[in-house]
Amino acid sequence: MSGLDSMMGGYGSQFAAGILLTLEISVCSYLIGLIFGVLGASAKLSPWKALRLLGNLYTIIVRALPELLLLLIAFYVLAGAISGLAASIGLVKSDFAFNPFLVAVIALGFIQGAYVTEILRAGVLALPKGQSDAALALGLSFPVRWGRVLGPQVMRHALPALGNVWLNATKDSSLISIVGAFADVLKVSSLAAAATKDYILFYALAALCFLLISVVSMAILNALHIRSRRGLHIA
């Protein structure tokens, strides 16, 4: 690591830590986005009008507003308002503040969840008619129906688009450098470039990191997509 540090003007170890933080934020926000997506898709497919309205508002508002604006609202409006309310009713101390990492991954996950919602909804609507009725006729329970029959078919349709959401999650992770003291890849690159005046080197390294993450991710996602279609016969 000392050789890497000297080659990068003393920023090698910070750059490596920045890559790890970027991956942590990407993975956590993506998983949270999947949870929001399942809830959102369930709401939009619900027989209850109120839930459908709530799901529609969620996807319309999140997809209409800039992601950076939503992140700023989460950090500087919602986090403070929630902690203030919790303190006013005695749930937390008056000087309580949310962990910035937690706020970041939940906010980014909330954003990704709007896109996952539409992807999963489309996957459910793409199911062949009668699949759910056939599973019910066989007496399969709800977990078995979705875990063994309907869920795998939904994922087969949704996997390519969910892969795109993952790639967006890795890129969106760079937004956190604007709203907090996060030493992610982009933040470390900016600090190192400003300190050493070697802008080409450090911004090229940042670009290379994101490119490598994308290439590896696409290879894994392509393998998963091929595996999901194993045994599928197309006439």
Image: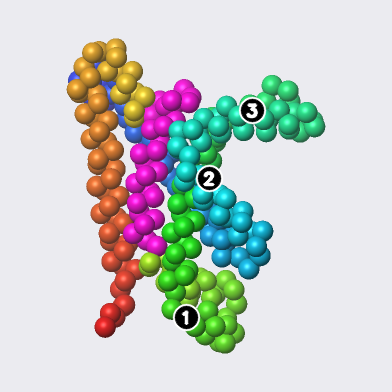
Name which of mark 2 and mark 1 comes first in the sequence: 2
To which residue does mark 3 refer?
Answer: 80
Name which of mark 1 and mark 3 comes first in the sequence: 3
Compared to residue 172, the image places residue 142 above or below, namely below
Query: Quick check: can you spot residue 6?
Result: no
Q: 24 or 40, which is in the foreground?
A: 40
How packed is label 1: few (under 14 Cα within 10 Å), some, or many (20 or more)? few
Which tag is nearer the camera, tag 2 or tag 3? 2
Compared to residue 183, the image places residue 143 above or below, namely below
Q: In the drawing, what numbered circle is on residue 61? A: 2
Q: Give the CA distance from mark 2 to mark 3.
A: 21 Å
Q: Give the CA distance from mark 2 to mark 1.
A: 31 Å
Q: Is 213 displayed left or right of 88 in the figure? A: left
Q: Quadrant of residue 168 in the image?
A: top left
Q: 175 or 187, which is in the foreground?
A: 175
Q: Is 219 displayed left or right of 95 in the figure? A: left
Residue bounds of the magenta highlight: 158-184
Q: Amino acid at mark 2?
A: Ile
Asked if marks 1 and 3 touch (Cβ < 8 Å), the reply is no
To which residue does mark 1 refer?
Answer: 129
Give yes or no for residue 168 being in the magenta stretch: yes
SS type, badge 3: helix
In x, y percent, where is residue 11?
29, 20
SS type, badge 1: loop
Compared to residue 222, the image places residue 207 above or below, namely above
Name which of mark 2 and mark 3 comes first in the sequence: 2
In the picture, the quarter occupied by the C terminus is bottom left
Q: Amino acid at mark 3?
A: Gly
